[in-house]
Structures are given as C-alpha cells and as structure tokens.
Image (spheres, rainbow, N blue to C red):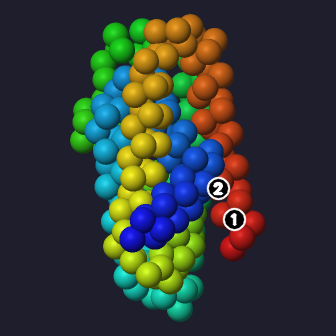
Amino acid sequence: MWQSYFNGLLIAAGLIMAIGSQNAFVLAQGLRREHHVSVAMLCIICDAILVAAGVFGLANVLAQNPTLLAVARWGGVLFLSWYGVQALRRACSKQSLEHGAAAGKRSRRTVLLSALAVTLLNPHVYLDTVLLIGSLGAQQSMPSAYVAGAASASLLWFSCLAIGAAWLAPWLARPATWRLLDVMVAVMMFSVAWQLIRSA
C-alpha cells in the first residue's frame, strides 16, 4: 500500500511542480489574494478526479480516441491565447496590486470558471495527469493508494503555491513587479499554446 502511495506522490509531484499555465494562474491569484484558496482547492479536486479517472480506465479511452485530444488541443490554444492577451493588457496598464484591489475583485464564480478553463482546456492536463499518471497508476498493486498519493501531491503543492504567494503579496505589490509577473504569465500562456500548435 505505502509503496503505491509514495509512487503516486512522487510521480505527481514531479509533473505538477513543472511550471505551466495552471501553476501560473494559481500563483497570480495568490498574489492578487483573489479567491486564491478556492482556486487552489478547485485545482486539487480536478487533479484528484482526473488521476482517478485515468487510473480506472479513462487513459485507455483517450489513447484510442485522437479526436477528443484534438478538440481539447485547439480549445486549449484558443483559451490560452486569450488569457495571454489579457495578461499583456494588464502588464501595459498602470496598476499595482493595491490598484487592482481598489478597482474591485472579480466574483468567486468568475475566478473559479477561469481556473476551471485553465485546468480543463489544457491538453497537457490530459496527457500528463490522465494518460501518464493514470496509466502508471493502473499498473500499481494498490491503485487506490496511488490515487491518494497523487492527490496528496496536488494538495501540498497548490496549497503552498496559493498561500505562499498571498503571503508574499505585500512585498511584491510594486507596479513594476506586477507588470513583470503579468508578462511572465503571458509568455507562459503563449508558449504552451505554441507547443500545442506544433504538436498538432
């Protein structure tokens, strides 16, 4: 049991911690202190569901149906490109974290829908979380323990990312720092979108 648990924990941690669009989104929400805990919890739940689905059969379905992956790929390209443009627009505006807070936070529903889109419209989620992590989990002696280990990795990572970023926000509230972060988020979104186009 524990062998399967730690296999899930280590494999998922290695993939989740790689910088990607989902991590960039959680980091940005943490720095804004805008529903960041809710965003982290949504990402944790989505990862757990996707890993469990992959371990218990969805990995085989996706591997045999390239049409589903193609739809996810092009939907991801469109969404990531749009989100990158929004980040660039913020970077070009004269705003800091305080200014953004004074202008009013977005609703929890809007933020969570954006987080859901960043998570589910990114084909890398299906390739890494469902296909790779899921297919490895299906080979474990205790698949359920493997899923629990992978979910634990998500819980630890996204909690630290969201809460740690919110804790650092007062020190990173300078307009120049925030513009740099938005530029980095935009570059990340565009680079992932470009990778998806190249892999088509």
Q: Which residue is mark 1?
A: 197
Would you place residue 38 above or below residue 139 in this image?
above
Q: In terms of depth relative to the viewer, which is nearer, 153 or 73?
A: 153
| Label 2: how many Cα within 10 Å (few below 14, some 14–19, many 20+) | many
Residue 38 screen position, x and y as percent: 29, 39
What amino acid type is highlighted by mark number 1? Ile
Q: In terms of depth relative to the viewer, which is nearer, 14 or 93?
A: 14
Would you place residue 57 above or below residue 171 in this image?
below
What amino acid type is highlighted by mark number 2? Ala
Residue 25 screen position, x and y as percent: 49, 39
Q: Which residue is mark 2?
A: 193
At 66% from the left and 32% from the top, the residue drawn is 184
Horizontal relation, residue 123 to residue 195: left or right: left
Q: Quadrant of the C terminus?
A: bottom right
Task: Tell me the quarter of the picture where residue 176 sits.
Answer: top right
The answer to whether the residue labelled 1 contacts the one labelled 2, judged by CB atoms less than 8 Å apart, is yes
